[in-house]
Every structure is written in C-alpha cells, then in structure tokens.
C-alpha cells in the first residue's frame, strides 16, 4: 500500500518538475513511510512512497522498471491473485507467440507490470485486487493509468494547459504548485445534501476522480478515458442454483476472499465492531489462520453507542487477541485535530475510522481486514426494504396524485420528525422509480430545507446514470439498489474515508466483501433469495453456524460515535468556532448555517448531528488547505 504521484507537462522545465514531484511525495509520506522514489525523464516525472506489505526487501522499490527498462510503473494497492497470475505469466500456452516473463522479485507490483506487457489494457480483466497505478512507456511516450473495479484505492487528477497531474490524494495536487485551485461551488448543494461529492467531481474545482473500473490513456498530451468494468452488467435474475447451492457458493467465494487477503509479510488484524459483517470476517480469518487473530474494537462510556459486549463475545468465540479501545470525550478532543488533518477530502464521516486505525497501528499492526461492503452487497441498510416496497406497492402507485399530496401535507403539518418529512417528499414524486426514490433515501434535507441553505440547489448525481438506459427488472430491485449504494455511499464516503484515515497512520485496510468474484455473483441473485426478512438473511445462511444468534438477530447499530452528546458539550466550543467561520465565508445563504446550528443546540428533531457535522469539517478543511473561495 502506497502513495503515487505523476506529472506530464510540456510547459514545465525539468527543475520545476523535479521540485513539484518531490513536494508531492513529501505530502504523501504518511501513506508510505518505508521508502520513497522518483523517476524523471524529459516531460514526465513519477513519484512513489512505499508502505511495504509484500516482499519487504529493496526489490519492491518504486518507481519500478520492467526487465527491458522500457516501462516504468508506480503502483498503489494489492493484487490478491498475483501468485496464480505469476505462474501463468511465466509460461506460455502452446501455439502462442507470447514470451514468458522472467521475474526478478516476489512482489505483486512486478506481476502487474508483466501482465501489462503481455495483455496491455486487457490486463485489468485478470487483476483481482484493489489498485491504482500508472505505467509509462518510454518508447511510445505514453502513460496508462488505471483504478480498481470497486474504487477502493483513490486516484485524483487535474488536466490543464500546464499539463496532466495525478496523485493518490487531493492534498498532493494542491501542494504541487502547478496552479492555484479554488472551491468547487457547483457541487456545494450535493455536499450539503449527501455529506460528500461523488465521482468524477471533487470539492476542488478542476480536480477530478478517476472513476472506479476505469482507465486513462495519455498519448501526445491527449487524455482518453475508458470503462473496463461496470457493476450493472452483472445484474440478472437467471441464477439457476437452488437456495442452498447459492449459499454454498457465497460461502466458498467469501472464504476464498478472506484467505487471499491474509497474504502479507507483516503483522495483521481485523476491525471488530460486533456486527454481522465484521464478525463473519473474523470467524473466517480464524478458520485459516495458524495464529490467534488480533481484533480491535472502540467502546464508549455511553452504553447506547457501544457494541463492545458483542465484540467481546466474538473475540472469545474465536480466541482472538482482543484490543478494546475505550474512547472518552477528552480522548477524542485530543485526537480531533489530527483526525481532521488526515481528512484529504471533507465529508460527514471518517473520524471514527481514524480512531480505530490509529489504535490498530499503535499495536504494531500494518494490515487489517474490515467488514465494509457487506451491507451494500447483502441489503443490510433499512433503505433496501423501503425501496423494494416502493417499487412493488401497487396501492401506492394507484393512489391519485391529489390524494398523495393531501397525505403529504398532513404529515408535514402534524409531525416534526425527519422520517415523516421524507415520506411526504416521496408521496409528492411523479413516480416511484429508483431514479426518483433512491436520492431521497440518502438525502439529509428536504428540497425546501436545501433551498434555504444553498444558493443553487441543482444536483447532477452521476451514480444514477446507469438507470437511464436500462429497463428495471422488478425481480432485481435489491441488486439495482446495491449498485446505487456502491456507486455513491460506498465509494464516495466509506471507501474514501477508510483510505484517507487508515493511510494517515500507514495502515492498509482490506475489504473481503468487495472481492470482484463475490460481487458479480451476488448481483446476479434475484430478490426472492436476497430479500432481508431478517438482517442479511442470505449472508447469515451462507455461513450457518459460524457466528451466534445473539449477533445475527440483534438490531443493527453501526459504528457511530456519541456525536450529538459531545457536540453539545465537550466539542461545542470547537464546533461553534467552525460554524461561525463558515458563516462568514458566505458560500451558503446568509444566516442559514448559523440557524441550523442553533436548531441543533435546541434539540430540534429535524436537525440531527449528521446534518451539521459535515459543515464543520468543510470549514476546517478549507482553512487547513487555504483553498481559494
């Protein structure tokens, strides 16, 4: 796991380019404290910072050169099937004109290089892992840049008259000095509504994200972007297996995914919340590991937020070396500046990940497994059921629009609850298709409330684009919802936060539920098998007997800090200072942010902590980066 940087420019001289790439590497030192390297050749410079996980020797130094010195690569990630690929690349099928590749290292980096030399862009079809990499062809003077299918590893870029610049983090591009950057006002409504900005946009004008499952080719300073994998293509309802056979297949794929993710030459562990997903991961790890697994859990004095009792139960069941991190408000306040500085892109989540990642790294762990992705794949969120019902409720569809509007008005007049306000918005929709209902399921504010906050409330949500040319199959609503969750909340919140917060302390995190083979298979399972009559029933049935019913049958909590309590008490001075500073910047409607804060302090039911916190992090990030407004 590492950090990668690159600059391609005809307008910069070699000294300017060298200084820029060095600054960018320093900005990513936290991602790769073990080694650093730079390659420069005319109009191109590549930089790398290394966190050694596989083959800890100097053989893993990057930028990495092919054996014939033609290709130069910077690579961030892990390829979980690299051993199988290595065997294939060392031999050649009968009748093939391909030459075998002679490996000089035991790294997965060299396997990616060899795969590219043999198959070109099609090498991506062979790679099972999380990655972002760039390969420079010295003969053609071209660059190939790719990102993994699920978007686990980040890749940001800017393309202007100064040239093309890319990095694992926004901060490195901002610090490069290639040009001045400003706040992206066109996405402020999206940020306010969804706590993040979705790919390909970012909060910075001119800086984009290479979308998951895409690659870029740069030839003669011209950039071409191509999608090589798209999740919707795997949505079918033709799975011919029985329910028990389907469960068996899921068990096989998930078990293999966990086993592959334990390949490392460093100490490893697991995040253990005590929920279904992390408990299953730990259980499967224990099955294949010869030594006790090290597990990490965050607990609080506030019992309503603490899942530690369940985490202890799983730790005891699988005989793990369990670490319980007791977090008090004062501990959190002490860590908050460091956690916020780790935030490469502002958002409404992520601080909790920093807390557990820091404790895990402090215990000497360099790599940890996580249960991220289980909810998205196996319909674990409440909105899966709600959206499924909306698509299939014929009574609601037959209700006249006027009747629905009257019911909506009644709900708004008689209730101050957020949930009722959302129902009212749904009832006013012209139809109940996923394009209309899914954005509402993830929104923080009603349209009326959003209009009071932002100067321009228009939102172009790229996550919905695949629905425009696709007829929705009524038996695959849950799979379509899974793809929507993956394209939005998973990639732009959970995975972004996991990467930036864990890599801030040089910890690699791997997500077994996001194995491409598992994802493709589960997307092809129809709703009848997947419907969550009980929490993630299909997943639980697939690992029957692995974890106890006290875990599978309890109510979902999620890993959430006691934000509301802390923000009104110990964190109030800090939060209030950020709110006042943001109000003074005048990027939102006058008085709107301050009014929202006051309503939160007054315990207004419609203003929960999550409707305020992302504005606080936005202001902190703006001041830390000194971004132009």
Image (spheres, grey):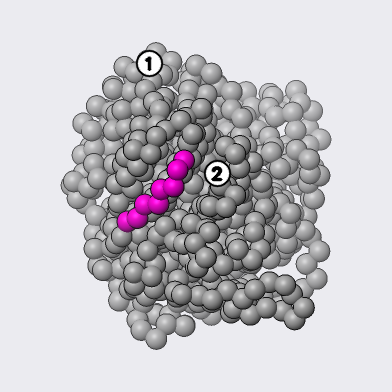
Other-residue count near label 2 (Cα within 10 Å), few / some / many at <14 / 14–19 / ≥20:
many
Q: What secondary structure is found at the residue carrying circle 2?
A: loop
Residue under label 2: 210
Residue under label 1: 586
The question of residue 146 being in magenta is answered with no
Q: In this view, does 290 lie above or below 566?
A: below
Give the x, y percent position of residue 28.
Answer: 33, 48
**Residue 400 visible in the displayed image:** yes
Give the x, y percent position of residue 368.
Answer: 38, 66
Give the x, y percent position of residue 616.
Answer: 33, 32
Q: Is residue 400 above or below residue 394?
A: above
Q: In this view, does 125 lie to the left or right of 512?
A: right
Magenta span covers which residues? 36-43
- Using the image as rendered, state which of residue 117 and residue 583 is in the foreground: 117
Marks 2 and 1, the one that precedes in the sequence: 2
Q: Name the residue: 61% across, 42% down.
A: 219
Give the x, y percent position of residue 312.
Answer: 33, 71
Q: Name the residue: 77% across, 78% down.
A: 95
């Amino acid at each position: 796991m590492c950090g990668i940087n690159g600059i391609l420019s005809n307008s910069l001289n070699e000294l300017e380019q060298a200084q820029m790439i060095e600054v960018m590497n320093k900005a990513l030192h936290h991602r790769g404290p073990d080694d650093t390297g730079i390659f420069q050749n005319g109009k191109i410079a590549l930089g790398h910072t290394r966190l050694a996980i596989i083959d800890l020797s100097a053989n893993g130094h990057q930028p990495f050169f092919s054996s014939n010195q033609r290709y130069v690569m910077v690579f961030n990630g892990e390829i979980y099937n690299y051993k199988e690929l290595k065997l294939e690349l060392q031999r050649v099928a009968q009748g093939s004109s391909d030459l075998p590749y002679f490996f000089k290292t035991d790294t997965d980096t060299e396997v990616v290089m060899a795969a590219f030399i043999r198959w070109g862009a099609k090498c991506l079809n062979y790679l099972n892992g999380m990655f972002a990499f760039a390969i420079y062809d010295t003969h053609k003077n071209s660059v190939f840049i790719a990102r993994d299918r699920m978007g686990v590893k980040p890749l940001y870029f800017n393309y202007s008259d100064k040239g093309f610049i890319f990095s694992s983090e926004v901060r490195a591009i901002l610090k490069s000095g290639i040009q001045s950057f400003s706040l992206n006002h066109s996405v402020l409504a999206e940020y306010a509504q969804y706590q993040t900005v979705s790919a390909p946009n970012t909060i910075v004008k001119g800086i984009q994200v290479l979308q998951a499952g895409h690659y870029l080719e740069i030839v003669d300073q011209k950039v071409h972007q191509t999608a090589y994998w798209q999740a919707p293509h795997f949505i079918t309802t033709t799975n011919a297996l029985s329910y028990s056979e389907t469960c068996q297949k899921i068990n096989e794929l998930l078990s293999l995914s966990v086993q592959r993710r334990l390949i490392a030459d460093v100490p490893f562990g697991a995040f253990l919340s005590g929920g279904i997903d992390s408990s299953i991961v730990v259980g499967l790890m224990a099955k294949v590991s010869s030594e006790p697994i090290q597990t990490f859990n965050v607990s609080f004095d506030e019992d309503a937020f603490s899942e530690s009792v369940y985490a202890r139960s799983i730790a005891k069941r699988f005989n793990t070396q369990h670490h319980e991190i007791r977090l008090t408000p004062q501990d959190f306040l002490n860590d908050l500046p460091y956690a916020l500085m780790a935030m490469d892109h502002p958002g409404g989540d992520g601080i909790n990940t920093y807390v557990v990642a820091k404790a895990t790294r402090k215990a000497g762990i360099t790599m940890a497994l996580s249960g991220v992705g289980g909810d998205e794949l196996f319909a674990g969120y409440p909105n899966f059921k709600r959206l499924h019902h909306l698509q299939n409720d014929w009574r609601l569809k037959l209700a006249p629009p006027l009747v629905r509007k009257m019911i909506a008005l009644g709900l708004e007049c008689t209730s101050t609850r957020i949930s009722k306000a959302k129902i009212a918005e749904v009832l006013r929709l012209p139809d109940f298709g996923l394009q209309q209902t899914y954005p509402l399921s993830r929104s923080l504010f009603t349209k009326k409330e959003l209009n009071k906050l932002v100067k321009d409330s228009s939102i172009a949500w790229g996550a919905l684009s695949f629905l425009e040319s696709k007829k929705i199959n009524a038996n695959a609503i849950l799979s379509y919802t899974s793809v929507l969750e993956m394209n939005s909340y998973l990639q732009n919140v959970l995975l972004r936060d996991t990467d930036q917060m864990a890599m801030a302390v040089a910890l690699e995190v791997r997500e077994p539920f996001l194995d491409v083979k598992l994802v493709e298979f589960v997307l092809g399972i129809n709703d009848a098998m997947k419907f969550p009559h009980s929490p993630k029933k299909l997943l639980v049935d697939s690992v029957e007997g692995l974890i106890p019913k006290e875990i599978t049958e309890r109510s979902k909590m999620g890993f959430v800090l006691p934000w509301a309590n802390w923000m009104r008490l110990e964190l109030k001075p800090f939060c209030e200072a950020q709110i006042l500073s943001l109000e003074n910047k005048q990027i939102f409607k006058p008085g709107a942010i301050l009014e929202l804060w006051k309503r939160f302090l007054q315990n207004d039911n419609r203003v929960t902590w999550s409707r305020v916190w992302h504005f606080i992090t936005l202001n902190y990030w703006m001041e830390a980066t000194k971004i132009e407004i």
